[in-house]
Image (cartoon, coloured by chain):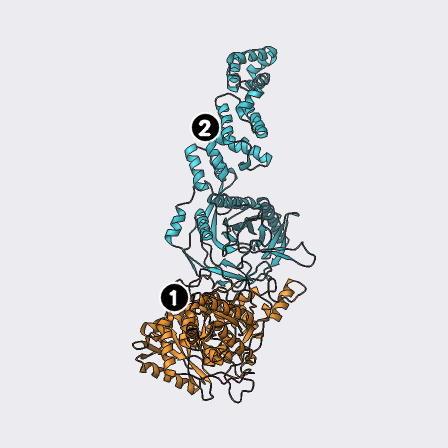
Chain colours: A cyan, B orange
């Protein structure tokens, strides 16, 4: 597969290459926090899931949650990354009311997962290989609430201490589309692995996007970091806006400042949050309350042995086993629920027909309804039955689309709908012949014309189909028309 | 009652066992002694009601045949250990009114063995100091006095309140914590026994942190035997402290009488400082002779990086402290001084809440961890720390124990060093190396200065070999026959 060319952005003074790196925070799917036994459930009453450790009471000590370590290793393996057998937890020091310890326990010099790479599928069959720099474990902070009192801020520590994986990419992405594809791919991988629910609305996944621009082939430009972007759409908007801002700035003779910026979804703009000069000196140092984390080969291999089939492997299998086009295979394998659905429908059926229907009409309809595949009103069995009815010429492809619409509306089985609506295809050649004869008889001028212009045959097909209310088998119509018109 | 409080832990244990007294009587004796010793300022909080209640419960248990290792023994607890429902201050204004809803593992272990809580002892603020003068609750006075020191003498620090309470018979024993010498140095300055076990031997859970990689709890007692009894009750693995070590706790008391015959004692040639009084040097030689006389072999060893220990300690400990003390921000507990905004509140609270020495160390610690300075200070100090530990490891190939003076001088006058932090820091010069290496050490009272003040000798042992340290300590104690007690000038 071809590695994608960098799409250049045209400015007023020439073209620009966009360079993007992403730091993604993914909440570890775990019932308890990284260093305490408190619960992590979303949406609980404020400060109802806070242990003495999470509140940083004097004398409290962190104890590492082994399950979170397993999840991080599992994710590292899913990202084709090196697992570091020794890693170190470090304190990142800064003051904020929702950070009770006055430091966040994170990993700095020695993260639990090292380098790796993942491959993004882009439009038109292109791919982009994106390097993974590292993955490390860290605590989440609590939440400050500023709108409850005119003078005071409130703090909810339910999230304080929740385990996050920070996944850092190399600066290998070249467009907003690729940035979105990267986060989508990450979400797919963690969902396959079950290590993060990937739910961006609840904040289980959020991205810090580093953006810079340069003239093609030149040194990297100064980057700006856009913090906490929490939807794929916003990622696209934020990158587009930021690229435009940086190009305009440079072309007007200015300089991009290294800074942290915030994306405002309402205005679609990014704005400066703090400059490099205002950046914190986090004074990282190894946390003396925790010993270095040492993993054995047995531990790592034990996790590797339980890894599910990953999306890229599944895609390769779809191409090989079912002869699917790489794009369709990628779309189907790109989401665990989609691939599960597809595999159910494809059983005993023509894979390409099934792939066309699942990725085409079916996904299209779901999109229009704004429904996730998990909540689709159509079961895999019913969609399979519909495809069977197309394969054995019970209904035409065109009518099948109408049946699908009714299925989406009513949830009824296709057999019942075809019966009730009388959509069964006419394959009786005698009946079709009669219609063809009638059409020919009514249009002598067109019959004369078609000898000169064979393209007019299509018009005849249309007339016959119309007269049969779409029920005539198109192949039979073509065959009979060709005979009768002497084409 | 004075006879009862003259009993050490082992003595009280026997008296209680024989029914010669009850825990309640014993406890009452100590409460009266504490009440009469306000001039020492050894306690921040005295708990007469709670103490009597615990003593009565102990007496009931004893009648029922339940007798823990410290059953009915009244103890004082350094106010750095969190005690459930009891004000816990770390001797800092910033913890005003802080009453923890939890009990530290070490104190919970003590209560589990039947001990009685008399009160919480004074200390240097957040255990930062060598004289107990940095306490928000005022300095502790050493029960020992000297002519010419009108304002009194310091008891050493940071466990100065515990040391003074033990020396003045205000408790049967006390807990201390030792980060760079905070148990051993005050023990030496008050004529008491102080033991810092191996790092990881006692759980740090629920003890307010100063420097996490160094802090270790230990007993402060009148005798080595008492230290063995108390340590046995305090120690043990704790799953809530990831740095606590899962290794069995031996019967320390059973080990102490093993003698030093056949042991090899190392004498480090580097343990000398400029201006160290000759009497300290003489006592050290005396200690060597005592151990030799009991059959020990004595060998000169080299701990050549000793001179780097103090500077290393004063980088590592403040670095950790600067981070550990970040949680005292006025948001959740303790003192809050309002400000115009959150930064103003932080600044006002911490400016008012912390004393000068704590601020000094937070500043030093913040500095040495800062970008551009980390490699030159913190990282370098960590490397030197590893080398210091290596020095000990090499020495312990050939020797079983290392004998040194505990402190370079006897107790000094209150206020005499407060303007000179470097000279104050120098007081820990002999205790800090073992702290950096995580090794167990004990200070045993061994003699008197010409000015009539107690002097201590220190024995340092191999990691988790507290038994040999206690054996050596007991041998020293027996040979020294130190029986001095300060005259009770404080009694009102």
Q: A150 left or right of B372?
A: right
Mark 1 is surrounded, within 10 Å at the Cα level, by few (under 14), some (14 to 19) or many (20 or more) other residues, namely some
Chain of the residue under label 2? A
Q: Residue at 60% of width from left, 66% of height from top?
A: B334
Q: A216 left or right of B406?
A: right
Would you say residue A30 is visible in this rendering?
yes
| Residue receiving disc 1 | B249
Which is nearer the eye, B211 or A245? B211
Callout 2 secondary element: loop
Which quarter of the picture shows residue B301? bottom left
Residue range (magenta):
B481-491
Residue B421 placed where, x, y %? 53, 78
Would you say residue B384 is visible in this rendering?
no
Residue A460 placed where, x, y %? 57, 17
Callout 1 secondary element: loop
Q: Which labelled disc corresponds to residue A350?
A: 2
Number of numbered callouts drawn: 2
B275 shown above or below A357 = below
Q: B388 left or right of A128?
A: left
The verdict on a common chain for dots 2 and 1 is no
Which is nearer the eye, B452 or A169? B452
Chain of the residue under label 1? B
């Amino acid at each position: 597969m071809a590695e994608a060319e960098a799409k250049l952005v045209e400015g007023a003074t020439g073209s620009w290459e966009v360079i993007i790196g992403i730091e993604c925070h993914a909440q570890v799917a775990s019932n308890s926090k990284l260093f305490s036994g408190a619960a992590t459930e979303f949406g609980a009453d404020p400060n109802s899931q806070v242990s003495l450790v999470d509140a940083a009471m004097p004398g409290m000590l962190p104890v590492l949650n082994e399950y979170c370590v397993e999840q991080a290793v599992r994710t590292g393996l899913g990202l084709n990354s090196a697992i570091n057998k020794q890693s170190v937890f470090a304190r990142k020091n800064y003051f904020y009311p929702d950070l009770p310890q006055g430091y966040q326990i994170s990993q700095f010099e020695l993260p639990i997962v090292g380098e790796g790479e993942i491959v993004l599928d882009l439009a038109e069959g292109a791919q982009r290989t994106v390097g993974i720099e590292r993955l490390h474990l860290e605590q989440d902070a609590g939440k400050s609430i500023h709108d409850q009192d005119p003078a005071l801020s409130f703090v909810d520590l339910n999230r304080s201490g929740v385990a996050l994986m920070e996944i850092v990419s190399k600066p290998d992405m070249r467009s907003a589309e690729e940035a979105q594809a990267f986060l989508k791919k990450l979400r797919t991988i963690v969902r396959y692995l079950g290590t993060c629910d990937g739910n961006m609305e609840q904040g289980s996944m959020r991205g810090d996007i580093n953006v810079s621009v340069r003239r093609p082939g030149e040194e990297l430009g100064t980057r700006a970091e856009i913090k906490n972007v929490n939807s794929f759409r916003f990622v696209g908007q934020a990158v587009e806006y930021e690229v435009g801002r940086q190009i305009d700035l440079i072309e007007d003779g200015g300089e991009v400042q290294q800074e942290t910026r915030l994306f405002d979804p309402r205005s679609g703009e990014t704005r400066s949050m703090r400059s490099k000069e205002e950046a914190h000196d986090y004074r990282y140092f190894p946390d003396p309350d925790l010993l270095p984390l040492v993993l054995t080969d047995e531990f790592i291999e034990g996790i590797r042995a339980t890894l599910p089939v990953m999306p890229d492997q599944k895609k390769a299998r779809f191409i090989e086993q079912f002869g699917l086009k790489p794009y369709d295979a990628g779309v189907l394998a790109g989401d665990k629920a989609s691939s599960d659905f597809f595999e159910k429908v494809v059983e005993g059926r023509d894979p390409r027909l099934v792939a066309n229907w699942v990725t085409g009409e079916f996904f299209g309809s779901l999109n229009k309804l704004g429904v996730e595949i998990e909540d689709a009103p159509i079961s895999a069995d019913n969609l399979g039955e519909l495809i069977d009815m197309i394969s054995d010429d019970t209904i035409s492809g065109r009518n099948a689309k109408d049946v699908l619409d009714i299925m989406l509306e009513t949830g009824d089985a296709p057999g019942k709908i075809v019966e009730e609506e009388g959509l069964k295809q006419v394959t009786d050649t005698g009946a079709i012949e009669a219609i063809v004869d009638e059409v020919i008889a009514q249009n002598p001028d067109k019959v004369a014309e078609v000898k000169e212009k064979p393209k007019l045959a299509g018009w005849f097909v249309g007339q016959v189909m119309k007269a049969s209310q779409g029920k005539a088998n198109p192949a039979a119509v073509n065959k009979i028309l060709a005979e009768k018109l002497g084409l | 009652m004075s006879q009862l409080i003259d009993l050490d832990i082992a003595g009280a244990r026997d008296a209680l066992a024989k029914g010669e007294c009850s825990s309640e009587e014993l406890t009452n004796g100590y409460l009266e002694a504490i009440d009469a010793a306000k001039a020492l300022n050894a306690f921040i909080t005295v708990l007469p009601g709670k103490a009597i209640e615990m003593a009565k419960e102990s007496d009931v248990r004893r009648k029922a045949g339940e007798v823990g290792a410290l059953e009915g023994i009244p103890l004082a607890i350094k106010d750095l250990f969190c005690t459930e429902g009891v004000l816990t201050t770390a001797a800092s204004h910033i913890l005003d009114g802080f009453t923890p809803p939890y009990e530290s593992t070490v104190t919970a272990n003590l209560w589990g063995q039947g001990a009685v809580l008399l009160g919480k002892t004074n200390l240097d603020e957040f255990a930062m100091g060598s004289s107990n003068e940095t306490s928000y609750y005022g300095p502790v006075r050493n029960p020992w006095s000297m002519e010419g020191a009108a304002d009194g003498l310091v008891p050493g620090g940071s466990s100065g309140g515990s040391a003074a309470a033990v020396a003045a018979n205000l408790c049967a024993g006390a807990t201390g914590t030792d980060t760079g010498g905070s148990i051993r140095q005050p023990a030496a300055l008050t004529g008491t026994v102080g033991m810092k076990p191996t790092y990881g031997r006692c759980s740090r859970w629920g003890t307010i942190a100063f420097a996490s990689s160094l802090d270790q709890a230990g007993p402060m007692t009148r005798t080595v035997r008492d230290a063995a009894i108390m340590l046995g009750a305090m120690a043990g693995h704790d799953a809530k402290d990831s740095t606590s070590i899962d290794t069995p706790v031996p019967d320390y008391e059973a080990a102490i009488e093993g003698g030093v015959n056949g042991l090899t004692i190392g004498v480090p040639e580097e343990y000398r400082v400029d201006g160290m009084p000759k009497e300290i040097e003489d006592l050290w030689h005396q200690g060597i002779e005592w151990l030799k006389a009991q059959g020990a072999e004595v060998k000169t060893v080299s701990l050549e990086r000793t001179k780097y220990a103090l500077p290393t300690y004063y980088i590592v400990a403040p670095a950790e402290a600067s981070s550990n003390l970040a949680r005292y921000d006025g948001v959740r507990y303790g003192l809050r001084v309002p400000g115009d905004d959150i930064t103003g509140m932080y600044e006002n609270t911490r400016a008012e809440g912390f004393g000068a020495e704590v601020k000094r160390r937070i500043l030093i610690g913040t500095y040495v961890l800062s970008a551009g300075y980390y490699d030159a200070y913190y990282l370098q100090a960590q490397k030197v720390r590893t080398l210091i530990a290596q020095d000990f490891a090499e020495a312990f190939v050939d020797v079983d124990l290392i004998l040194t003076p505990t402190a370079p001088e006897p107790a000094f006058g209150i206020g005499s060093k407060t303007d000179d932090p470097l000279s104050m820091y120098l007081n820990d010069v002999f205790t800090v190396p073992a702290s950096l290496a995580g090794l167990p050490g004990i200070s045993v009272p061994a003699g008197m200065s010409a000015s009539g003040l107690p002097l201590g000798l220190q024995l340092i042992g191999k990691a988790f070999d507290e038994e040999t340290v206690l054996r050596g300590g007991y041998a020293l104690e027996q040979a020294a026959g130190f029986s001095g007690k300060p005259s009770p000038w404080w009694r009102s």
